[in-house]
Image (tube, grey):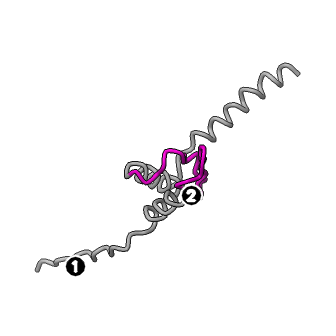
């Protein structure tokens, strides 16, 4: 029993540690980047904290003392994560030398 416990505890810690060290998905990176941009622009109130982002991009917030500013932050984050409306110019056609 003690041997089983001695093996199970470190093994469990290793498995849990491996899960937390997985790299972010592109969706997570996009949401974290948007939050940092909104914070840098002063559009993320100091009472709202982004806690975690799910792999599919869903965000979890905490509000301290009040939820004032949550809608402003959500608007900013939506704006930052929305695909650009500026069209990408087409590539120049290749020039064929004769």
Residue range of the region highlighted in magenta in the rendering: 42-69
At x 76%, y 27%, the residue is 9
Q: Nearer the viewer, residue 33 or 19?
A: 33
The correct choice, above or below, for 58 with respect to 63 in the image is: below
The N terminus sits in image quarter: top right
Q: Is residue 41 magenta?
A: no
Residue located farthest toward the top when viewing the structure as drawn: 2
Question: Residue tagged by mark 1?
Answer: 93
Q: Position of residue 30 (x, y in %)?
A: 47, 56
Q: How many marks?
A: 2
Mark 2, other Cα within 10 Å: few <14 / some 14–19 / many ≥20: some
Q: Nearer the viewer, residue 36 or 18?
A: 36
C-alpha span from label 2 to label 1: 37 Å
Is the stretch drawn in magenta largely helix, strand or loop?
loop
Q: Position of residue 18 (x, y in %)?
A: 62, 38
At x 28%, y 77%, the residue is 90
Left or right placement of residue 7 versus residue 51 in this view = right
Question: Residue tagged by mark 2?
Answer: 57
Q: Position of residue 54 (x, y in %)?
A: 61, 53
- Marks 2 & 1, CB-CB < 8 Å contact: no
The correct choice, above or below, for 87 with respect to 30 in the image is: below
Please give the label number shown on residue 79.
Answer: none
Q: Nearer the viewer, mark 2 or mark 1?
A: 2
Left or right placement of residue 84 versus residue 61 in this view = left
At x 60%, y 48%, the residue is 66
């Amino acid at each position: 029993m003690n041997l089983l416990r001695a093996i199970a505890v470190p093994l469990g810690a290793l498995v849990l540690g491996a899960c937390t060290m997985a790299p972010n998905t592109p969706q997570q990176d996009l949401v974290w980047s948007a939050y940092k941009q909104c914070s840098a622009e002063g559009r993320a109130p100091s009472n709202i904290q982004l806690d975690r982002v799910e792999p599919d991009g869903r965000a979890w917030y905490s509000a301290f003392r009040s939820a004032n500013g949550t809608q402003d932050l959500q608007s900013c984050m939506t704006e930052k994560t929305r695909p650009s409306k500026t069209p990408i110019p087409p590539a120049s056609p290749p020039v064929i030398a004769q």
